[in-house]
Amino acid sequence: MDKINLHITTFKTKTREWLTRHADSPHVKAWLAFFSFAEATFFPIPPDILLIAIVAARVNRWIYFAIFTTVTSVLGGIAGYAIGMFIFETIGAPIVAFYGFEEGMEKVSKLFADNAFLAIFVSAFSPIPYKVFTLSAGFFTISFPVFVIASLLGRALRFFLVAFLAKKFGKLLGRFVFTYFNVLSLLAAVFIILLVILLN
């Protein structure tokens, strides 16, 4: 498992560098669509770094690229949902096993039982692996409309926030936000959960 984690970390670093270098590529939209879609299903690299680089160079189109990333990511989530529902044993289970998320699925089932909408929303926004929730939602047959709405809200909140910060403060803060995105989004997710509890 340690070797797998090391390989994944190395792969993430190299891919992150590649994404930054290719942010001005004429095919950048295709790459953004691929990473947004794939990350929601099986890929370990989040699309945020590419979104930041794109928006920093095209600040007047930050809303467009935030919407584009949200939609393609949710479509990837729907693909993950379908894998979990129809072909989990052949494709979903190997993905879960590869990342060592077997125990995570058990925890996800409990979260779904408590509040499926909130669980999916938080996973879509935060650094919690969204792919585990997309596969699990299909496997545990969570309501599809609930899954899609929660995914749309969570992914939109995340990518609009990232795109806005990249547009407002440029590449310098973009790098900072990406470096500390896990911490920032976890704090935001905790705040959202506390707000929901208080409102109830």
Image (cartoon, rainbow, N blue to C red):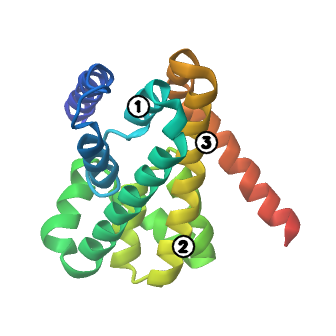
Q: Circle 3 — which element? A: helix
Up-down relation of residue 25 to residue 140 (above or below): above
**Residue 126 seen anywhere in this rendered image of the structure:** no
Residue bearing the label numbered 3: 161
42 vs 174: above or below:
below
Is residue 15 shown to the viewer in this render?
yes
Q: Residue furthest front?
A: 60
Residue at the spot 47% in from the left edge and 32% down from the top edge: 55
In the rendered image, which quarter contains the C terminus? bottom right
Say which residue label 1 marks: 54
Q: In the image, what residue occupies the spot 62% across and 75% down?
A: 114
Please name whichever residue, 83 or 65, is drawn nearer the observer in this view of the structure. 65
- Residue beneath disc 2: 149
Q: 10 Å neighbourhood of mark 2: few (<14), some, or many (≥20)? A: some
In front: mark 1 or mark 2?
Answer: 1
How far apart are labels 3 and 2 at the CA level?
A: 18 Å
Q: Which residue type carries mark 1?
A: Ile
Rendering coords of residue 26 (x, y %): 23, 33
Residue at position x 28%, y 80% in the image? 85
User: Does dot 2 land on a helix, a strand or a loop?
Assistant: helix
CA distance separating discs 1 and 2? 26 Å
Lower position in the chain sequence, tag 3 or tag 2: 2
Task: Depth check: give the residue in front, 107 or 165.
Answer: 165
